[in-house]
Image: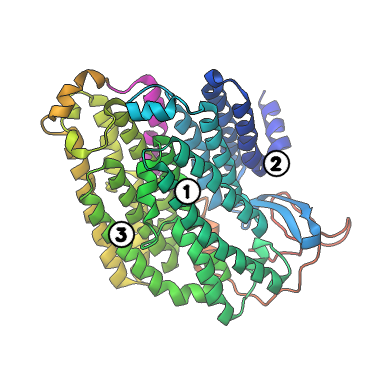
Amino acid sequence: MLTFIATYYAFWQPYFLSLLVFLPLLAAVITLAVPQRVSKWVALVLSLAPLKVAVATLFFFNPAQPGLQFAELHPWLPAFNIFYSLGADGISLPLIALNCLLTPLCILASWNLGAAQTNHESRITNHARPNAFFASFLALQGAVNGVFVAQDFILFYLFWEAMLIPMFLIIGLWGGENRVYAALKFFLYTFVGSVLMLIAGLWMFTHTGTFSLPVWSTTHFPIAAQSLLFLAFFAAFAVKVPMWPFHTWLPDAHVQAPTAGSVILAGILLKMGAYGFLRFSLPMFPEAAHTFAPFIFTLSAIAVVYAALVAYVQTDVKKLIAYSSVSHMGMVTLGIFAMTPESLHGALLVMLNHGIVSAGLFLAVGVIYDRLHTRELAKFGGLVQIMPAYAFAVMFLTLAAVALPGTNSFVGEFLALAGSFPSAPVYTAIATTGVIFGALYMLHLYRGMLFGTPSTFVEEHKSHLPDMSFREWLVFIPLLALIPILGLMPSLAMNLWAQPVQILATPPITHNPQPATLLPEEGQGPEVSPTTITSATEVPAQ
């Protein structure tokens, strides 16, 4: 039996990354085609297939091997030197695994889509198509996985823009009262920045003759051009993070999005901007990254403190958590541009763990919203007396959000701040106050919702407040389990990205390559290895 399993996975191993991209897209098509009444079951079952592949990919990944693994390289538009080029490393794989985990949890959390709730909601959801809703999440999963594994710029850009469509539909069709405004704002902010990135990418093609990201990472672009290229890519990534002051689309998107939309938005989509900084800005424009680092430090420190203070005064629970995401991602960008091994490890840990904790918090808001149909903090209170199991789950998530030692957030925030201090002591000191403010608004949230005397509103709707169901526990258990696991054993994640972090902390600078050629004929040029990525030209070892 074990031999059969080993042979089975060995056969599929060269195609793991393609499966991670196209299995969700195929699942989306199938979900659209099935009858509405069974669409959620079909979507749930099909969403487990990419999760299985993600686990297998993590199992077969070799952290000690530098460079990209599970490489795939095929001609796509060879006349334009564009290739279907995939590869993954220790930075992308944890984010892929998180994406593949959150998608089935979002489907489970949206199990009652279409059930009549408030008058406004039933007007929206009763006429919505559940199969289209679940298919949008599956398509989004495939596009996001594509962003994390694409090693050709055109392919990367295709997936980067493609993910806007399902997220736009999720917010615009199944969101709240101002859903169209929030969806358009999300789309336009992201799209405008992406156009500048496309222009910069086309210039880089004219300079190198290739769209290969590994080649770009080992190219020393002219110093004068690096600044402009850095700013063009910064426009795309800063909006996606989002960094202050490009963050204004995020609270609106979160408030209007359905619960599952907020989970994916905070859990994985915000990490795409930080991933872009790690994949493009640091290795491709190292001099410009050092030049603009003080500017990034300033924006990051402002984001950490400003967003935390704004979060404290929010009356909408969802908006409070949305601003907390801006604050935490400010710590991520601070750690990335400090460019020390410790700060990079910390930034990556904060990215991963924020995805887990923020997803759990938005799911917790969804549980109570399904029952009371309100997110106003003033209308809650005393829920611990009525829903003790729910109070326990929220307590676990709250302690993780405030980075209590032993939880998954502690090591990441500690490393991000400690590693950033030598490079930016003043900005790090300012950002450290965000840890205090974070505890302030999260404990304020927990006390207002769970403790004290039940509000009049809660007393009136007490009959509508059953404790968490078995299905809801299934949604929370994976996230709650990861909090102590990664809190006590952060090396499980840190070992995966140790090699790329070391490279980013000391970025190599090489001479300009010769213009790239097309894919070599059989028997000529470099051999494509199944574990190391190549491009249209030979790529120096990373």
Q: Residue at x 35, y 30 (%)?
A: 120
Instruction: Tell whether 326 sits left or right of 541.
Output: left
Q: Residue 415: where, in percent of width, then height?
A: 36, 58
Whichever of labels 2 and 1 marks the residue nearer the N terminus, that label is: 2
Q: Residues within 10 Å of mark 2 (few under 14, many from 20)?
A: some
Q: Which residue is mark 3?
A: 304
What secondary structure is found at the residue carrying circle 1? helix
Q: Nearer the viewer, mark 2 or mark 3?
A: 3
What secondary structure is found at the residue carrying circle 2? helix
Give the alpha-carbon distance from disc 2 to disc 1, as whole Å: 24 Å
Instruction: Tell whether 4 sits left or right of 149.
Output: right
Q: Which residue is mark 2?
A: 15
Instruction: Tell whether 480 sits left or right of 1.
Output: left
Q: Which residue is mark 1?
A: 269
Q: Residue at x 76, y 64 (%)?
A: 537
Q: Residue 24: where, in percent of width, then height?
A: 60, 36
Three-letter code for the amino acid on which mark 2 is drawn: Tyr
Three-letter code for the amino acid on which mark 3 is drawn: Val
Quadrant in which residue 216 is drawn: bottom right
Give the alpha-carbon distance from disc 3 to disc 1, as whole Å: 19 Å
Whichever of labels 2 and 3 marks the residue nearer the N terminus, that label is: 2
| Secondary structure, magenta segment, majority class | helix
Residue at the extreme left: 453
Q: Is residue 487 magenta?
A: yes
Please give the count of numbered marks on the rendered protein.
Answer: 3
Question: Start and end of the magenta stretch?
Answer: 467-493
Please tell me whether residue 405 is drawn above or below residue 232 in the rendered image.
above
